[in-house]
């Protein structure tokens, strides 16, 4: 569908839905950058088409993979929309992951073009240097300034330019073209990386049409029109909520990152109606001294999710912000699954857990045992989900796809839960060995494989430990190799160097031996219990 076509329906590429919303009111402010620069809907629409023409002229089109490495800038949203409009799939490279991990993701998805934030030029160069496959073409979102003490030419190691400036190329076009869309409803619009226990990243394939349908549904209490504060990475859920906001005719206010004082000030200054936070970030907001004196009267929806939330902290948040709390449970493989509204937080289940809500429209939930038998109300089993939002599969990993997509479109979530007779879902455990931290999911096996390569390490186990607020941290228990001495700080640095700061252990415990389960595996439940007391070594 081209830029002059009638408003699209939901069974179309999602870009048609979003671009139609931008066309309807071109004078409205669509984006406000961290430096205060305002971008109208009309200007964003024009930038998308200029970028689309430029990418197409460079051979990018339907079936291409475009990887994005950027902070929270208006231009990265425009670049994503442009790539998707001409049929390319996009991949999000998370700032904060180590270059080795970024290169593994970029390699795994056959990146044809890398679009990089000029402020991340050193990371982009390090990524490119570690690729096993062919080097992709590179475009930057503005000029690259290498005139800093760490730049290659200042170290006596001159480098060629990182890539052409995409913004300059777009500005050089004398007219804004109307670029026909090439994406089809069943095409993948993105591949979202979720980690992998063997070091091979899992790429979740998401199709256009289900995403377009989600964008077309109003979000309760988000504002009319909504004003979203995006203070977490646009490569994650903040980017999805930005799309929802723009489609609803609203404004997205961008911050470079999360700082609780800055977030509170921005809510008051920009009259924010919708704020998204992971629970650990919500806790930081609750503890900030400016909370009591900040005008939060514009806020009508505070969405939290991504990891378990502390019931006591949610009660504190309800007192501080009022009846605006909305919890969401979902996965990259299934998009949103359930929602719990302000009046529903009193609904509790096993162990006093707060419900994660009821199934959203179009979502089916079943709790099943290991044999696949559907269990009744109150029975504990693995949560299965079926909806139009379930992924197409993992990119080029049919075996893993077959493990989680089972029978007539059902997805195994890996979460252990209970449904009551009213349809409320309670999560009680996790079937998968994964640690949920701010920024994403940490696969313990990836860190264990890395640490076992260190000559000082004989055995190790990586596990998650919850704080008093319910946040999860990465812990490591390690046994030294015979005749060797383990330096915990050296192991931390090794993990950060190879995996990134998101994987950094909060504690490294040196032990004489690891407790084992009856089948001979490290007993991580025992290690978690031990970690609640004084650490043996850290």
Image: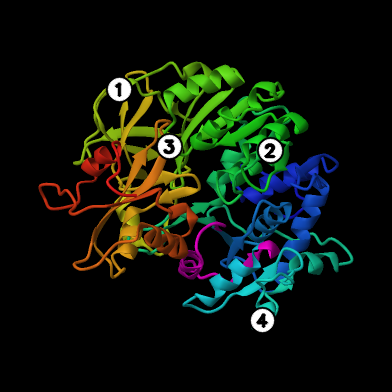
Residue depth check, mark 1 versus mark 3: number of the one nearer the observer: 3
- Which disc is residue 351 wearing? 1
Which is nearer the N-term, disc 1 or disc 4? 4
Mark 1 Cα shell of 10 Å, populated few (<14), some (14-19), many (≥20): few
Q: Mark 4 points at which residue?
A: 159
User: Sequence-wise, which precedes: disc 4 or disc 3?
Assistant: 4
Helix, strand or loop under label 1 = helix
Residue identified by numbered label 2: 262
Name which residue lies at 68% across and 53% down.
77
The residue labelled by disc 3 is 471
Confirm whether residue 429 shows in the render: yes
**Alpha-carbon distance for marks 1 and 4?**
59 Å
Work out whether 417 lies above or below 146.
above
**Residue 189 screen position, x and y as percent:** 56, 55
Residue 113 visible somewhere in the drawing: no
Front of the two marks 1 and 2: 2
Sequence-wise first label, 1 or 2: 2
């Amino acid at each position: 569908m081209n830029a002059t076509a009638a408003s699209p329906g939901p069974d179309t590429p999602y870009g048609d839905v979003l671009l139609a919303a931008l066309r309807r009111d071109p004078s409205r402010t669509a984006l406000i950058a961290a430096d205060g620069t305002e971008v109208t809907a009309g200007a964003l629409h024009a930038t998308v088409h200029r970028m689309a023409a430029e990418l197409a002229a460079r051979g990018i089109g339907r079936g291409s993979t475009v990887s994005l490495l950027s902070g929270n800038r208006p231009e990265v949203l425009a670049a994503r929309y442009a790539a998707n409009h001409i049929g390319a799939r996009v991949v999000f490279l998370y700032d904060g992951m180590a270059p080795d991990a970024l290169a593994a993701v970029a390699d795994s998805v056959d990146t044809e073009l890398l679009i990089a934030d000029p402020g991340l030029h050193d990371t982009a160069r390090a990524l490119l240097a570690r690729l096993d496959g062919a080097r992709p073409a590179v475009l930057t979102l503005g000029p690259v300034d290498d005139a800093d003490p760490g730049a290659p030419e200042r170290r006596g190691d001159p480098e060629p330019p990182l890539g052409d400036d995409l913004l300059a190329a777009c500005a050089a076009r004398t007219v804004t073209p109307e670029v026909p869309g090439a994406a089809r409803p069943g095409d993948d619009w993105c591949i979202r990386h979720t980690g992998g226990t063997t070091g091979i990243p899992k790429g979740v394939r998401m199709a256009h049409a289900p995403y377009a349908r989600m964008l077309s549904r109003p979000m309760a209490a988000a504002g009319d029109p909504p004003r979203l504060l995006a203070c977490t990475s646009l490569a994650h859920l903040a980017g999805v909520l930005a799309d929802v906001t723009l489609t609803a005719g609203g404004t997205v206010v961008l911050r470079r990152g999360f700082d609780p004082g800055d977030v509170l000030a921005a809510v008051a200054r920009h009259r924010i109606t919708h704020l998204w936070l992971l629970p650990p970030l919500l806790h930081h907001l609750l503890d900030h001294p400016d909370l009591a004196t900040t005008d939060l009267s514009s806020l009508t929806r505070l969405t939290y999710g991504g990891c378990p939330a502390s019931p006591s902290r949610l009660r504190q948040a309800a007192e501080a912000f009022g009846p605006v709390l909305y919890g969401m449970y979902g996965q990259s493989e299934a998009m949103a699954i359930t929602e719990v509204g302000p009046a529903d937080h009193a609904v509790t289940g096993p162990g006093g857990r707060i419900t994660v809500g009821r199934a959203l429209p179009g979502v089916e939930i079943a709790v099943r045992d290991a044999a696949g038998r559907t269990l009744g109300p109150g029975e504990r089993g693995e949560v299965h989900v079926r909806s139009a939002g379930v992924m197409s599969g993992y990119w080029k990993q049919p075996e893993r796809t077959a493990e989680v997509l089972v029978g007539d479109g059902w997805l195994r979530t890996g979460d252990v839960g209970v449904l009551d007779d009213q349809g409320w879902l309670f999560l009680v455990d996790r079937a998968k060995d994964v640690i949920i931290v701010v920024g994403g999911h940490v696969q313990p096996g990836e860190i264990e494989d890395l640490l076992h390569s260190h000559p000082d390490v004989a055995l190790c186990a990586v596990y998650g430990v919850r704080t008093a607020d319910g946040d999860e941290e990465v812990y490591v228990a390690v046994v030294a190799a015979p005749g060797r001495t383990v330096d915990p700080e050296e192991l931390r640095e090794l993990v950060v160097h190879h995996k990134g700061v998101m994987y950094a252990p909060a504690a490294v415990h040196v032990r004489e031996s690891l407790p084992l389960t009856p089948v001979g595996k490290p007993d991580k439940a025992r290690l978690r219990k031990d970690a609640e007391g004084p650490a043996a070594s850290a």
